[in-house]
């Protein structure tokens, strides 16, 4: 085992191992390391840790020091110098009329070397350009041609999946990708759908290729002759992810059936003739999926608010109270009047039943015209009258509970007609007095 630290340079996402030289380095620290090109400024991605000797490429370069404040200022100055060099090189390219695209400029930590990365369709003669740049910067100039995939790795961006480029995030090296992978995974062969921003095939085609190849070894090909629980037939479709095949049976070719891979027996893999193939009499057993275990409900913060409580039945005492509350809200009854109603009916019977008792024609008072006078409609407050409302509503409830025969006949006016009773409205609705203290007209 060898103790190393992992560092990453600004040019890419690949990590390199360096010898920490008995120095404790933490993740995220800036360090100065020795490379084949000289001293370089890098960032530690993993502190002191041990790896296998086979993973280390000898000779292992040493760590010079942990970056100081002067080293950070030097690195910041080099970044500003890179921006100026990029603009100057762009102008020089236009002056020489070279068909090349400048991608990036990197300046070494000691400032003795400037590296220019560019892309081009073919070979470019940039010898005159190098002489002009060397005369401007008075340092060693190097131009390096890269491909479109390296350009995407340096610049970065978002892919069609909405995530950053894999090459600029975690991929150390580019993996070979071919159009055969798209065919194996049953993807569209439209270049615009399977190509990345760089114009090449997407690197993510390689991620699931091994799983698809392993599944294809177990699944039959199209047009294979197979035996199923319902009889022999030919395979017309294969679902690699679910490992299911669609078979067109000989007895029912118009209605293909879907089977699991373990439900079929391959008699001939691929296209061909059936001559000489013996169909076994025994048919494979059907695949039975195992029942999934029920997951326990996960308690949530809002479980108390979303829980459904069992409501009491309408025939019970609690159900009658709830119904009276609903009627009180609809008709404007207050708490005081509800208390009076409960006193008038202590046995839990509905007050509505008492009101609905039939009255005889002799008990009901009638006017001279023979019609019963209209009863006063009472509108109470919202039910916030408190003790005053209860005291005022109690005598009213006792009068209502008394039998109708004891009520005195309404006095008649001189014309022989019963005087119209004044329609009473309660007090202010926000107080809910319930109309306890009222005045009648004489």
Image: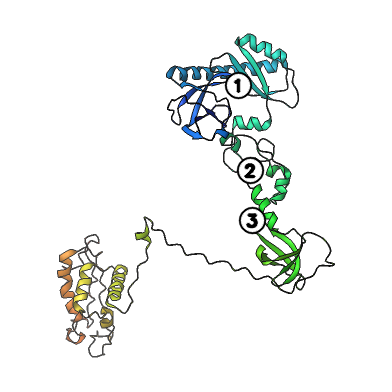
The quarter of the picture where residue 304 lies is bottom left
- Label 2 Cα neighbours within 10 Å, binned few <14 / some 14-19 / many ≥20: few
User: Where is mark 2, residue-wise?
Assistant: 204
- N-term-proximal mark, 2 vs 3: 2
Would you say residue 415 is visible in this rendering?
A: yes
Q: Position of residue 13 (x, y in %)?
A: 56, 32
Q: Is residue 242 above or below residue 109?
A: below
Which residue lies under the disc numbered 1?
Answer: 105
Q: Is residue 438 visible?
A: no
Mark 3 lies on residue: 241
Quick one: label 1 or label 3, which is nearer the N terminus? Answer: 1
- Residue closer to the observer: 92 or 370: 92
Q: Quadrant of residue 252?
A: bottom right
Q: Against 90, is 288 above or below? A: below
Marks 1 and 3, how far apart at CA: 45 Å
For the residues marked 2 and 3, what is the alpha-carbon distance in whole angstroms?
A: 17 Å
Compute the Cα span from label 2 to label 1.
29 Å
Quadrant of the drawing holding the C terminus: bottom left
Q: Is residue 274 left or right of residue 209?
A: right
In the image, is residue 363 above or below residue 186?
Answer: below
Is label 3 in a helix, a strand or a loop? loop
| Rendered location of residue 172, percent (x, y) | 60, 34
């Amino acid at each position: 085992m060898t103790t190393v630290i992992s560092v990453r340079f600004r040019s890419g996402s690949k990590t390199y191992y360096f010898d920490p030289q008995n120095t404790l380095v933490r993740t995220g620290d800036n360090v100065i390391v020795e490379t084949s090109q000289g001293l370089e400024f890098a960032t530690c991605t993993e502190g002191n840790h041990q790896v296998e000797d086979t993973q280390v490429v000898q000779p292992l370069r040493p760590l010079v020091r942990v970056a100081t404040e002067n080293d950070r200022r030097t690195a910041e100055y080099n970044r500003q110098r890179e921006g100026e060099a990029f603009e100057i090189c762009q102008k020089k390219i236009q002056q020489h009329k070279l068909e090349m695209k400048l991608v990036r400029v990197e300046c070494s930590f000691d400032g003795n070397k400037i590296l220019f990365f560019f892309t081009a369709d073919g070979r470019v003669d940039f010898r005159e350009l190098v002489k002009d740049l060397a005369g401007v910067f008075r340092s060693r100039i190097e131009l390096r041609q890269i491909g479109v995939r390296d350009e995407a790795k340096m610049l970065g961006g978002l892919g069609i999946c909405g995530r950053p480029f894999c090459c600029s995030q975690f991929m150390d090296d580019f993996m070979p990708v071919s159009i055969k992978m798209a065919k194996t995974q049953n993807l569209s062969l439209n270049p615009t759908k399977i190509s990345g921003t760089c114009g090449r095939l997407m690197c993510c085609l390689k991620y699931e290729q091994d799983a698809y190849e392993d599944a294809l070894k177990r699944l039959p090909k199209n047009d294979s002759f197979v035996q199923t629980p319902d009889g022999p037939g030919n395979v017309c479709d294969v679902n690699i992810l679910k490992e299911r095949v669609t078979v067109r049976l000989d007895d029912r070719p118009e209605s293909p059936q879907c089977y699991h891979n373990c439900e079929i027996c391959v008699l001939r893999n691929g296209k061909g003739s059936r001559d000489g193939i013996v169909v076994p009499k025994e048919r494979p057993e059907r695949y039975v999926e195992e029942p999934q275990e029920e997951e326990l409900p996960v308690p949530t913060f809002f479980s108390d608010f979303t829980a459904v409580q069992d409501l009491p039945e309408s025939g019970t005492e609690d159900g009658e109270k709830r119904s009276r509350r609903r009627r009180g809200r609809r008709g404007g009854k207050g708490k005081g009047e509800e208390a009076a109603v409960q006193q008038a009916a202590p046995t839990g019977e509905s007050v509505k039943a008492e009101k609905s008792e039939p009255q005889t024609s002799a008990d009901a008072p009638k006017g001279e015209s023979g019609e019963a006078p209209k009863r006063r409609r009472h509108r109470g407050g919202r039910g916030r009258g408190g003790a005053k409302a209860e005291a005022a509503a109690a005598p009213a409830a006792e009068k209502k509970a008394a039998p109708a025969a004891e009520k005195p006949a309404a006095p008649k006016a001189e014309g022989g007609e019963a005087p119209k009773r004044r329609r009473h409205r309660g007090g202010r609705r926000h107080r809910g007095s319930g109309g306890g203290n009222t005045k009648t007209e004489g």
